[in-house]
């Protein structure tokens, strides 16, 4: 009798300890060891948020839906809007998007909106079109439905982007951006373009950027680290999406039961070792370099002045689900825009100019390169499946436009460069057509056959 009572007490104490640790865990703990971000590197985030918010407006000259209070769509020049694709144009294949030229900052931007909860097609065609380990790509795994949506947009807009880059000159950057569902599409579009830069006038890798806001888990860990020099993910405090390892098709399929799903995932991950997570090459992660906006503290009410932390983590890449009342609200693009703008103003106010700006920029870029190298080395040390070597990734600013060597290198011979495939040939490699004439991704594609030669 005494033994059974003792066991009951042990179980009760263990459950109590687990409940305390989970319920008191806050999002700020995920990045507490990360360094603070610099205002120069974080500066594009608020205005990219406003470009994405502009997609939701019916008339940008008279915004009525999500215009940020007091600022409106500050910095978004109506004359710079080249194209707006609505559901009428794209059907059920991908979310609406916008092509925008920012002449002030010398950027060509393609931005994609997030999930529309009122459209079943967004679930079925994009999110539900995936299974764990279904799509291998560039030496890793990616989300099948998001890859198809990325390919669809590039088919439509490659010519437009080529013309805009050619018209505006080599100083203009090519920016892909997205929120939630759109973030995964934007990240995979970036990977496709990085490996096919000759289609865009040999644009340097350093001139391509992606901003994934409230990012979806869309690529395996080796790819998330490999492309950390071009993809930037922004997470607001307790946002659930980048932390939830559950496949997207299950998350949004049970959106109205989300708190129950998150609690079950907490229980499951408690008994799953981190080493097992790393060893699973099919497990998807939020892509690229992480920027974490922190604005709440433990046992404190209200929002504090936001701070931004950044790193390229290999371990602890938002692996813990946060059970809080702001888990879903922190996913909203409106809140991300508002808090990122506040954080940027605070960073600029606290900045102390001690050295010439050019030198500051040079030193910061060098630290980016070193941080990327360290992350790649760490992934190798942890035996992350398909982790790439340092020699396989372009890191240096201004390096020649050669894709990673685990793809087919552009520079191996002049004959290969001359025989560059087109998007039609890439589409033929990635897709086939079923009896109804619809595009279907080939399931047996190997990594070396996916990326363009």
Image: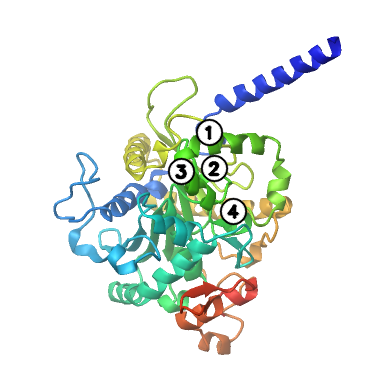
Residue 322 circle label: 1
- Characterize the local packing of mark 2: few (<14), some (14-19) or many (20 or more) Cα atoms within 10 angstroms: many
Instruction: Check if mark 1's residue and mark 2's residue have beta carbons within 8 Å.
Output: yes
Q: Position of residue 345 (x, y in %)?
A: 32, 38
In the rendered image of this protein, does residue 295 appear above or below residue 311?
Answer: above
What residue is pinned by disc 4? 284
What residue is pinned by disc 3? 255
Q: Position of residue 339 (x, y in %)?
A: 35, 38
- Characterize the local packing of mark 3: few (<14), some (14-19) or many (20 or more) Cα atoms within 10 angstroms: few
Q: Nearer the viewer, residue 189 or 106?
A: 189
Q: Quadrant of the C terminus?
A: bottom right
What residue is pinned by disc 2? 243
- Sequence order check: which comes first, mark 4 or mark 2? 2
Instruction: Check if mark 3's residue and mark 4's residue have beta carbons within 8 Å.
Output: no
- Sequence order check: which comes first, mark 1 or mark 3? 3
- Sequence order check: which comes first, mark 3 or mark 2? 2
In the rendered image of this protein, does residue 235 appear above or below residue 110?
Answer: above
SS label for mark 4: strand
SS label for mark 2: helix
């Amino acid at each position: 009798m005494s033994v059974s009572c003792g066991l009951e007490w042990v179980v009760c104490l263990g459950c109590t300890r687990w409940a305390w640790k989970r319920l008191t865990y806050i999002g700020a703990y995920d990045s507490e060891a990360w360094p603070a971000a610099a205002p120069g590197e974080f500066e594009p985030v608020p205005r990219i948020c406003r470009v994405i918010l502009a997609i939701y407006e019916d008339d940008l000259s008279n915004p009525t839906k999500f215009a940020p209070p007091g600022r409106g769509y500050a910095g978004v020049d109506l004359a710079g809007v080249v194209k707006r694709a609505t559901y009428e144009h794209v059907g059920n294949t991908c979310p609406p998007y916008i092509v925008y030229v920012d002449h002030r900052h010398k950027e060509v931007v393609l931005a994609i909106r997030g999930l529309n909860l009122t459209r079943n097609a967004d679930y079925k065609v994009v999110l539900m079109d995936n299974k764990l380990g279904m799509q291998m790509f560039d030496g890793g795994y990616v989300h099948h439905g998001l890859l198809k949506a990325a390919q669809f947009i590039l088919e439509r807009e490659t010519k437009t982007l080529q013309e805009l880059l050619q018209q505006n000159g080599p100083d203009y950057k090519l920016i892909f951006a997205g929120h939630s569902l759109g973030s995964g599409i934007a990240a995979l579009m970036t990977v496709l373009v990085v490996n096919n830069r000759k289609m865009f006038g040999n644009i340097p890798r350093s001139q391509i950027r992606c901003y994934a806001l409230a990012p979806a888990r869309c690529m395996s860990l080796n790819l998330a680290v490999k492309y950390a020099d071009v993809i930037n993910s922004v997470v607001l405090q307790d946002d659930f999406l980048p932390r939830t390892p559950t496949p997207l098709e299950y998350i949004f399929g049970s959106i109205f039961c989300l708190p129950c799903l998150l609690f079950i995932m907490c229980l499951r991950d408690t008994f799953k070792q981190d080493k097992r997570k790393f060893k699973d090459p099919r497990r998807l992660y939020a892509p690229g370099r992480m920027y974490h906006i922190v604005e709440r503290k433990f046992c404190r009410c209200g929002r504090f002045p936001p701070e931004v932390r950044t790193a390229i983590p290999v371990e602890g890449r938002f692996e813990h689900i946060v059970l809080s009342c702001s888990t879903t609200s922190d996913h909203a693009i409106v809140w991300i825009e508002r808090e990122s703008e506040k954080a940027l103003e605070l960073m600029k106010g606290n900045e102390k100019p001690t050295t010439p700006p050019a030198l500051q920029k040079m030193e910061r870029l060098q630290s980016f390169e070193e941080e990327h190298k360290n992350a790649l080395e760490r992934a190798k040390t942890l035996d992350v499946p398909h982790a790439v070597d340092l020699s396989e990734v372009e890191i240096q600013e201004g390096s020649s436009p050669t894709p990673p060597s685990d793809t087919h290198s552009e520079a191996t011979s002049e004959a290969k460069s001359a025989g560059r495939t087109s998007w039609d040939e890439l589409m033929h490699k990635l897709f086939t057509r079923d009896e109804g004439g619809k595009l279907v991704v080939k399931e047996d594609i190997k990594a070396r056959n996916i990326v363009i030669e």
